[in-house]
Each structure stands twice: as C-alpha cells, then as structure tokens.
Amino acid sequence: MGKKLINELTENILNNSDYDVLACQDILFKAIESDPVNLIINAGRISRRYIKKNVFTCAILNAKSGVCSQDCAFCAQSAFHNTGVVTYPLLDCKKLISSAVEMEKKGAVNFSFVTSGHTVSKEELVIISDAVKQIRKQTNLSLCASLGQLTEVSAEKLKNMGVSRYHHNLETAESYFDQICTTHEYHEDINTLKYAKQAGLYVCSGGIFGLGETWEQRLEFFVTLKKLDVDSIPINFLIPVAGTKMQNRPILPPMEALCCIALARFMNPLKDIPVCGGREKTLKDFQSWLFLAGANGLMIGNYLTTMGRSVEMDIEMISDLGLKIESIGR
C-alpha cells in the first residue's frame, strides 16, 4: 500500500508541478521510514521530468576566512568557536581571478566568492567588483556571490557589477533556527533573499542537514523555500567540526541523506538542487545516487574549511552516469 501511494503521488506531480504535495506529507514520511529506495527512485523520476538530463557544476572560494561575528553552531569560522581554522582578510583581486580561472579549467560552470562575516564592507565590495569584471572577460563562468546579509542597495550593486547569482542559506527551519544561531533573526536571512530576487539575481538558498532537526522541520524548511520561490536549493550535510557546538553530532546515514535530497525534489519539482558540502563523508559509496535521488547539480573542489574529493573523480562520475555538464548562463 505504501509503495502504491508514493507512486500515485509521483504521478500526480509528474502531471502537475503545482500539485499540493504538502497535503500528502504523511505519505512522504511513511515512505522515508518504510521504503526509502522507492522514494529516492520516484524523486529521480520527477527530476528527469522537469529538469534537463544535463547537470551543472559549481565551485567556491573561501575569499575571506574566520573571525565571523555570528554564532552558528556548526561553523568552524565563527569567532565563538575555537577550531584552529586559518583566518585571513579578503583575498586580493589577483587571487580571486586566478582561482576562478583555475576552477573553470577543471570543469566548473559556476563560481562563487564566499566571505565570512555578517556582511562585507564597501571597500571589500570594490575589490570583488574589480575581480568580477576581469573574470567575466577571461571566462565563461556564471558568477555567484555569498557575502552575508544584503540590503536593497547592495543587491542592486551586485547585479550591476556583473554577478548573476546570490547564495545565502537559511540553514534550517525557522522553528529550529534558535538552536543553531542566536546572533541574528531568521527574518534577516529571508529579507536578504527577497532583496536578491528583487534585484533580478538568481537566488540560491539551502541548508545543512544533520543538525538535530526533525523530518517535520525538514519539510517546513522546504516549504519556506518553495514560498520564497528561490531558484536553487543547495543540500549540505553536517560534518562535525571539533570546537563547534555541533562537534558531537553523528553523521547522517547515507540513505537518510538521500531521502533529504528526495524530499527537496518532491517539494520543489522545478528548482535546481545541487549537492554540496559533506557529501563525501555522508554518502560514502552512494555519491552517484544523489542524481537518482533528484539532484541536478554538484559542487566540485574544496569547500570553505574542509577538503572535497578529487575534481577528476567527480567529472568521471558524471560522465559514467551518461550525464553532461551544462553551462547555466552568465
């Protein structure tokens, strides 16, 4: 009976991308508990129906590291934690450019500058602007920025300087956010997403799974992103870092992590869903399953403070699955 119900729900979504999945949440939760493989397979069907067979690859640069004023419980870069992370100010323009050029050569079609802290200064924004101009001349990369909180003015500036995408994670459901961060309010993050969208930027916002949230809160989280109509939902998995408040959290089992991806696809059939940080240690030998579970993007290379796996291995995995890397526009 459970398999029949999830199959019927999938058919309804395949026939109508606006189908009210929320009304069927009990079916999803039962499938997660009793038949996760069937849920994953059906999420893949939804992805293939609405998303092209090709996938996109993105890479990030930790452009400014550490000493962040926010107390996010998972973050190695928070000034509230003693993790021994390397700290440095915003990299110079030359380094920003060379990193982007290098990652395009390795196979990335999207590149993002990521800076620690609540936001960036006007002086830092000038350096980033100069780098963006040169990168657009020297590469075909789609350029993204993840610079903390935005205002209406700063969002417009980013758009005008040549940034096409803005990344800002909500991290988790609003009902669980106070267990993760207390130095700013959830609505500040939502406002940043709204400002980015108003400015005409492609908006990328997801979260980290394995923070101690419930399945109900995961669903709440995906509903929030659906209502905000974000363009991309990056999925990350917690890798506990010594010295953070989350240092003793267990790593999610691979099948549970894949069900998080599947739930994202069921709730947001038309959106891009890349899988990013934590996938190597969490999914282990099941990394190729992430596309079966509904993902259509992959972060390659290293992350902010942790190492990723070989870019060549990821490119080979994509090729072996019969998928092609596709540009996502500038």
Image (spheres, rainbow, N blue to C red):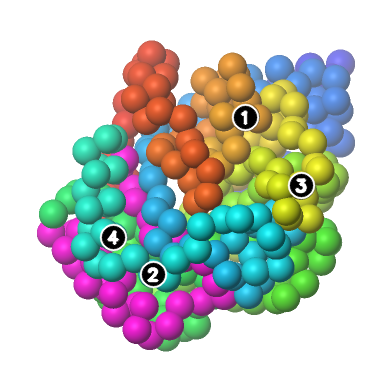
Secondary structure type for disc 4: helix
Give the residue pinned by disc 3: 247
> Are the residues tagged 3 and 2 within 8 Å (C-beta)?
no
In primary-sequence order, the first of circles 3 and 2 is 2
Q: Which mark is residue 145?
A: none
Q: Residue 249 falls in which quadrant of the image?
A: top right
Q: Residue lying furthest front in this view?
A: 84
For the image, the number of numbered tags is 4
Q: Residues within 10 Å of mark 2 (few under 14, many from 20)?
A: many
Q: From the viewer's perspective, tell me whether residue 105 is left or right of residue 284.
A: left
Q: Residue 298 falls in which quadrant of the image?
A: top left
Secondary structure type for disc 3: loop
In x, y percent, where is residue 96?
A: 28, 60
Residue at (22% x, 72% y) in the render: 130
In space, the residues marked 4 and 3 are separated at their CA atoms by: 31 Å
318 or 179, which lies in front?
Answer: 179
In x, y percent, where is residue 192?
A: 55, 73
Give the residue pinned by disc 1: 281
Q: Say which amino acid is labelled 4.
A: Leu
Residue at (38% x, 85% y) in the render: 122
Q: Say which amino acid is labelled 1.
A: Lys
Q: Nearer the viewer, mark 1 or mark 3?
A: 3
Q: Quadrant of the C terminus?
A: bottom left
Give the residue pinned by disc 4: 96
Q: From the viewer's perspective, tell me whether residue 266 is left or right of residue 151.
A: right
Secondary structure type for disc 2: loop
Give the residue pinned by disc 2: 90
